[in-house]
Amino acid sequence: MTWFNKQSRLVQLLLLLIPGVNWIVELVVRWSTWLKKGGLIRLIICIIVTIGGGLVFGWIDFVWVLLFKKLFLQ
């Protein structure tokens, strides 16, 4: 999560825009955040992203980063 937040906004948006890459970014960012902060909602989101919802959350996060400069539900 720290690595992702240190990137420029353009790099963050590009990482979330590319379909295969956004799933990997979602996996790494979501699971590392859950390991550090815990929480039931974060765990549920991590499981959804892992099973295959990563592409959907990647697009949601793309719009969220564009509007609010942070990931959705982080």
Image (spheres, rainbow, N blue to C red):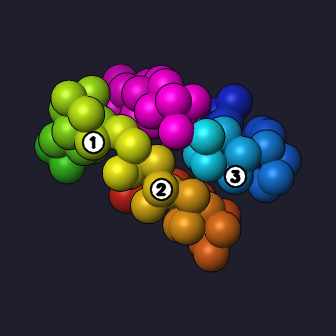
- Please determine whether, in this image, residue 70 is positioned above or below residue 31: below
Task: Say what secondary structure mark 1 lies in.
Answer: helix
Q: Is residue 48 above or below residue 10?
A: above
Image position of 26 (left or right of 70)? left
**Residue 29 visible in this rendered orientation of the protein:** no
- Within 10 Å of the Cα at label 2, are there few (<14), some (14-19), or many (20+) other Cα atoms? some
Task: Kindly identify which residue carries mark 2.
Answer: 59
What residue is drawn where x is 62% and y is 75%?
A: 67
- Image coordinates of residue 55 in percent, x first then y, are 39, 43
Local crowd size for mark 3, using a 10 Å CA cut-off: few (<14), some (14–19), many (≥20) = many
Q: Give me the disc on residue 13.
A: 3
Magenta-drawn stretch contains 30: yes
Is residue 28 rendered magenta in the image? yes
Return the residue at label 1.
53
Dot 3 or dot 2: first in sequence order is 3
Residue extent of the magenta highlight: 19-38
- Give the quarter of the figure containing the N terminus: top right
Label 1 amino acid? Gly
Earlier-in-chain disc, 1 versus 3: 3
Q: Could you say which quadrant of the image residue 53 lies in? A: top left
> Left or right: 74 with respect to 46?
right
Q: Residue furthest front?
A: 19
Residue drawn at 41 percent across, 28 percent down: 27
Q: Earlier in the sequence, mark 1 or mark 2?
A: 1
Residue 52 placed where, x, y %? Answer: 25, 34
